[in-house]
Image: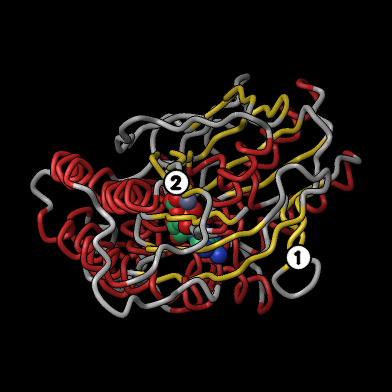
Amino acid sequence: MKILGIETSCDETAICILEGDPSENDLGVRLLGETINSQTKIHEQYGGVFPMMAKREHAKNILPLLEQTLKQASLYVAAHEKVDSLDKEIGKKLEEIFQKETGLLEETLNFISSIKKPDLDAIAVTEGPGLEPALWVGLLVAQALGLAWNIPVLPTNHMEGHIVASLLIPDQKLTLTLAVPNFPALALLISGGHTELVLVKDWHHYEIIGSTKDDAIGEAFDKVARLLGLPYPGGPEISKLAAEWRAEYSQPLFTLPRPMLKSPDFDFSFSGIKTAVLYAVRHFEKENNRPLNQKEKQALAGEFENAVTEVLISKTRRAIAEKGAQSLILGGGVTANTYIREAFKKLSAEMSTPLYLPETKLSTDNAVMIALAGYLRIKNNQNTVGPSLRAKGNLSL
Ligand code: KG4
Ligand code: ZN
């Protein structure tokens, strides 16, 4: 079967087409096409993702990306004349679904009528968690395509996507195999919106055992970067400075707290450490009567990365032991961080617990993880086709 994946939960518009045979035992899939448009340059000026701007950009890019992806998969066949594939009933239903989004509806209908129905079997689309205005764009287009092409639309959880993306092992070019972790597995999800420790009892069976009480870890990276005058997204920038500090001298110039390191639960808190960075900068400027130079910024970034990594490692180590986890899965955009990846490789060796890390390319938001999560639900008969879909900003696993 061929499945179309659509992801628009934050600032990446991503589309892909995966092919696999759900009746087969193996968990191999082929990637037939994949496109992604990142809006980071646009949001940079606001220092974070501006939801209405994200929505506008998704709406602008989603259909051109869809066209490109279908072409990559050799599924794009232009119609010689406009295909009128929608009966009145469906047209009316779409008007109800799209409501005020008449521009997007018109463009989507134009797109649908300009091509022959592609050989696709299902659509997996992110329903949450994420920014609701952004999520809606993917959900609306997915529903229109599903109705016009008469194929099911599977609402998909973005965080489940991050978990399964970490299990993908690239075999050959464009062929991917999914590893089967030993259950129960422990998943640590670290992204711009989440910091969660999840016990994965089996495919699709989750228990959240800890989460952040305030900021997500990626958000803390982004905010600290802003304090140091670095562009959005801040994670890669902080990580670069921290690596320079470690490589060049690694003398600590600053000391930051390790929030909730000793708390008996599995929860996190990252807003205090961001404030501690702010105070450290202010204190330094007052004492020295000048802003931080490059070397001092490197040292502060390094100390920040050390502090948050120590907390993540310590909580995860205890969760593995207490919950008897048989494997460890790391997912979400912050897993692109080299220092954090290396620290978890050491923890995995220390605890003899197999570790699943996403390929760097699949660390941050993408559509492969969404198509894959939808595909797995079909394979495991956990299909959740909804009659009408809704953006669920705070959807939990
Ligand atoms: O999963 P993701 O792409 O989007 C969300 O679902 O939130 O994660 C984005 C987050 C941003 O906060 C970004 O700063 C962070 O991942 N990030 C990193 C790195 N690369 C991306 N954080 C630390 N180090 C990195 N190298
Ligand atoms: Zn994400």
Crowding at dot 1, Cα within 10 Å, few <14 / some 14-19 / many 20+, comes out as some
Q: Are marks 2 and 1 in contact (CB under 8 Å)?
A: no
Q: Is residue 47 visible?
A: yes
Q: Nearer the viewer, residue 30 or 156?
A: 30
Task: Tell whether 319 sits left or right of 263.
Answer: right
Image-based side of 384 in relation to 21, left or right: left
Compared to residue 141, the image places residue 115 above or below, namely below
Q: Amino acid at mark 1?
A: Pro
Which amino acid, by three-letter code, is at mark 2? Ile
**Is the residue indicated by label 2 positioned so its CB lies within 8 Å of ligand 2?**
no
**Residue at left offset 32%, top offset 52%:** 148
Task: Report the residue marked by disc 1.
Answer: 170
**In this rendering, would 212 be left or right of 382?**
left
Secondary-structure class at tag 1? strand
Query: In x, y percent, where is residue 332?
Result: 55, 51
Residue under the image location 63 percent in, 49 percent down = 309
Q: For mark 2, give the secondary structure.
A: loop
